Amino acid sequence: MDRDAGGRAQGLKPALVADTSRVPVSTIAAMATPPGPGAIGIVRLSGPESARITRDVVGRVPLARLATLLPMYRANGTVLDRGLVLYFPGPASYTGEDMVEFHTHGSPAILAALLQSLYARGASPARPGEFTERAFLNGKLDLLQAEAVADLISSSTEQALKAANLAMAGHFSRAAASIAERLVEVRALLEAGIDFSDESAVEDAHHLESLHAQTTQIQTEISELLRNARHGAQLARGQRVVLCGSPNAGKSTLMNALSGNTRAIVSPQPGTTRDVLTAELDLGGMLITLIDTAGLHDAEEAIEQEGIRRAWEAITEADLVLLVYDAAEEEASSVSLQRILPEAGERLILVRNKIDLVGELPEQKQSGAGPIEIAITARNEQGLDILRENMRRALVREAETDTPLLARERHLRALMEAESLVGFSDREEFGADVVETAERLRLAHRALRELTGDFTSEDLLGEIFGRFCIGK
Ligand SMILES: Nc1nc2c(ncn2[C@@H]2O[C@H](COP(=O)(O)OP(=O)(O)OP(=O)(O)O)[C@@H](O)[C@H]2O)c(=O)[nH]1
Ligand SMILES: [Mg+2]
């Protein structure tokens, strides 16, 4: 597949384009700015009737890409607002169709009146993500880029933004497409070998040796892509950090101190937190979900037991566990540590809290290969800097890469499938049954092409674009 420097996919998804019933012909309109009052509001229009509808609503079609101040009319001829109108003739527009943007004062009443006026002239309301879906169907974006558009809009940290930008610029698509292309080459050479197997056994062996080496190299590249995608996926969903430990250790106090609010109730009474509470935190560009849990102990009461069950669930799913204990009650710590260590393994930081009670100073220590331990006083926020820095380091170590690619579960699944399909333990396995080997390479190629949307069912498209906001 040809891709230009901007990463646009050309001649994409022949299967979809050939089916002309899929090509949308209606002209759609929607608000592109969030609901509610604002300084300005933007309505978008896209489709073959855009120019005609615009002439009906604002009197004329402005020059291409030139912001023009014009009155906008209701269907009954009265002026509803004056604002800027921008005309983007296709195919040089976001959707690839003729598009118009109307910038009005940001009153919900004006925006509603403008939309009504557009509908009265023949536009129909856009479904969520329909503008981007049209961009995909018109070959302006491939599926990875289209999904990155949604992720870009919802990215809430600097790093997630970087990952979405890389994916949208076609970084992910180009990498997947180039690996897919080389898989086809290897398969073609392998199949050629099957057809003309009158060569000598020595040549055969040599041929297989070289193809196996290429396949191994391809697997390495898929693994690298998968690593970047995993990192991106983690940035997008945020990493889960669980606060756990014995009742009264100061977990909720620490959660409040780290997140800078007073969400969690704190009290000297053990068993204060009964349920799982969360707060979001931006830790040096990383999105973190902090999870406060019920104190772990042998509870007799049903509500507490349920809270503790949920705490264990959170620990199992966590990217990092902070085990908080009271410095004045060392014993409690070793008990909970013994239970948590097998669950949390390396994803654990010990937090020795309330050191004000035992007259210690904040510090970081580690004995042997055991977990890192940070001594703090949560109540007056002493030692939190050291703790934050260690949390950041532990989370970065999980999956740090230079080029995170904003990925979703769908992408990770496809990459993992491709990675395992091209994995052969040695040349013997690779050459044992060349027909089967060729089939595995074919399936791996298919998994990679699914990423960019070359083989994609309509159900999947509906699911992907249905999750966009309306107007995008
Ligand atoms: N002296 C001192 N007291 C603290 C510190 N951190 C928390 N506390 C006190 O310890 C008590 C329990 O704190 P919480 O944050 O509610 O403890 P928890 O671990 O969430 O307790 P449960 O929800 O009951 O499991 C409260 O009275 C806090 O004010 C600290 O660093 N120093
Ligand atoms: Mg609590």
Image: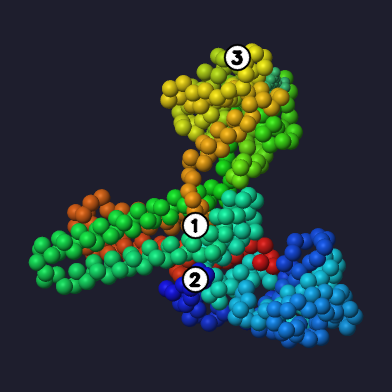
Residue at 33%, 65% (x, y): give it: 183
Q: Quadrant of ligand 1?
A: top right
Q: Which mark, residue 329? A: 3
Residue at 70%, 82% (x, y): give it: 64
Q: In the shown orientation, is residue 126 left or right of residue 410? A: right
Residue position for label 2: 5
Residue 281 location, quadrant: top right
Residue at 51%, 27% (x, y): give it: 372
Q: Secondary structure at mark 2?
A: loop
Q: Is residue 447 above or below residue 371?
A: below
Residue situated furthest right in the rendering: 78
Q: Quadrant of the C terminus?
A: bottom right
Residue 96 coordinates in the image, percent (x, y): 60, 77
Q: Which mark, residue 410? A: 1
Q: CA distance from mark 3 to mark 2?
A: 63 Å
N-terminal label among 1 and 3: 3
